[in-house]
Image (spheres, rainbow, N blue to C red):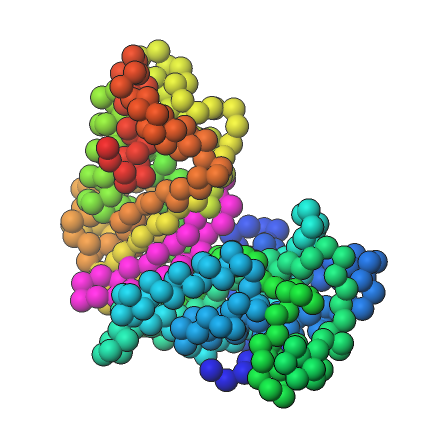
Amino acid sequence: MEEEKVEEAKVEYVDDYTLDSTKYIYVDGYKIPVYKMQDNTKEVENEIIQYDMDFDSSKFFTVAKRMFLDILNAKTQRETTLLKVIESPNLYVQHEREIAEDVQGKKRHIYEDPSIKYVALKEVSIDGEKEILSVWLSVAVQEYFENETTHELLTEKYPVPPLYNYRINFIRNKGTKTNLASIKCNNCNATVDLEMSAKCQYCGTLIDSSKYNWVINTIEIVKEINTKLTNIITEEDPLFSEEKFVAFVNKTFIKVQDAYSNIKLEDIYPFVTEALLEKLNKEIELNKGYGNVETREHIEIQDTYIQDMSIDSEYEKVTVYLEALLLAYAKDIEYNVVSSGTDKITVVRKYNLELLRKAGLKTSADKDIATINCIHCGAPFNLDEHQRCAYCGAQADTDETGKTDWLLNDMLDIVEKENDNEWKEYIEKKEANFEDSIKDKRDNGFLNSVGYRRGIFF
């Protein structure tokens, strides 16, 4: 893999339509969510200079980008030697295990043509004897798996490299000062420039940078954004609007949650597939069997974006990430009281939504994306108006998918274990065999419904 060169890119700040206060920058056609990856470089640099006067953020970025690209290259080449000197022991063990699993599975994990689009300092902190420097980094890269023998693709390659956003934590010993120029090779005693490589430029010996400066301790994905997917869709469907599509997704999500809470799924019949209706019906009946109804109220959409897409012979499918602030609780049907959760405190819930439409279907110029047509008389149904045709009175028929626009096909609640008290309670009770001692059948039923919602059965 060739050495990465990052050129200065012209950026443009724009308002986003999903959240009024959101700001993005565009770099080489990629959309960087700087409202979530805020650039605090100047503030953090000034803070570090107070006790490490030689720290220079621009030089640090050069080293940080080189180290990150070295990791991608090492995973592609299945070479762990270099990782030992640029990663903490915990991260090294993790990557060594991942590489070993790939070898055992006879597959290669490829990172092809990585290009770093954005890097910024987030914050610096002290934890015991370690100094932690958090960094935002965005990279466009083709990441895929292939069979090591036949080179057959095991995962999809996109027409354009997707953008991946990371929060990377670098660590060094507390009290360590920046002094790259004085690093000496243990083998030949030559001065080593760690901005260029973690190897001695004279004898090739690996330099353990942890003894002198920063190593990477954790790498966390902030968000997977395929920002050029919209361009791919519009190549085949020129009138497709990401803004209108996202607005449609948000309205449909709220409508589905409202119908689910009020047990009135007929209200969403025109806008979801039979498969999703069946799934929601099963979940509602399971809850009702134990005297509960799950409620979602006061929904505020925080973020929505297109995450992935695929096309087969029948359907065009789009995966959407959605984050919402809402009240989520269960209510006892008989006594009309809260039986689990709370109706006082809002929580953040994250979802992966799948929407589909018939392959080859194009956005019409004379109707909004949030509208479908009656299969009987051709008149439009509007998302905010009728579930039945206002002209002929017919119910919209989602079996005739080719006659409709986008339909919500699946809605998966992404489990955030560290923040989901309901889920943690469920797991703890299961592990303690608490189910056998539950006297209230309704409580037992609610626990099982939580598991059902996450696709786990006991």
Q: Does residue 399 belong to the magenta stretch? A: no
Q: Is residue 448 above or below residue 305?
A: above
Q: Is residue 80 left or right of residue 199?
A: left
Residue at the spot x=33%, y=72% of the render? Answer: 108
Q: In the figure, residue 231 lies in which quadrant?
A: bottom left
Q: Residue furthest front?
A: 187
What is the x, y in percent for residue 106?
27, 70
Magenta-colored segment: predominant secondary structure: strand
- Specify the segment rendered in magenta: 293-322
What is the x, y in percent for residue 418?
48, 39
Residue at the spot x=67%, y=65% of the render? Answer: 211
Position of the C terminus, as image quadrant, is top left
Q: In the figure, residue 333 lies in which quadrant?
A: top left
Q: Is residue 99 left or right of residue 90?
A: left
What is the x, y in percent for residue 258?
37, 33
Seen from the viewer's position, the closer of residues 388 and 279 is 279
Q: In the figure, residue 241 lies in which quadrant?
A: bottom left
Residue at the spot x=23%, y=39% of the render? Answer: 279
Seen from the viewer's position, the closer of residues 53 and 346 is 53
Q: Does residue 302 belong to the magenta stretch? A: yes
Q: Is residue 178 left or right of residue 288?
A: right
Q: How many marks?
A: 0
Seen from the viewer's position, the closer of residues 389 and 413 is 413
Q: Is residue 162 visible?
A: yes
Q: Is residue 248 visible?
A: no
What is the x, y in percent for residue 131?
69, 54
Seen from the viewer's position, the closer of residues 102 and 203 is 203
Q: Is residue 341 above or below residue 356?
A: above
Q: Is residue 292 above or below residue 458?
A: above
Residue at the spot x=26%, y=45% of the render? Answer: 272
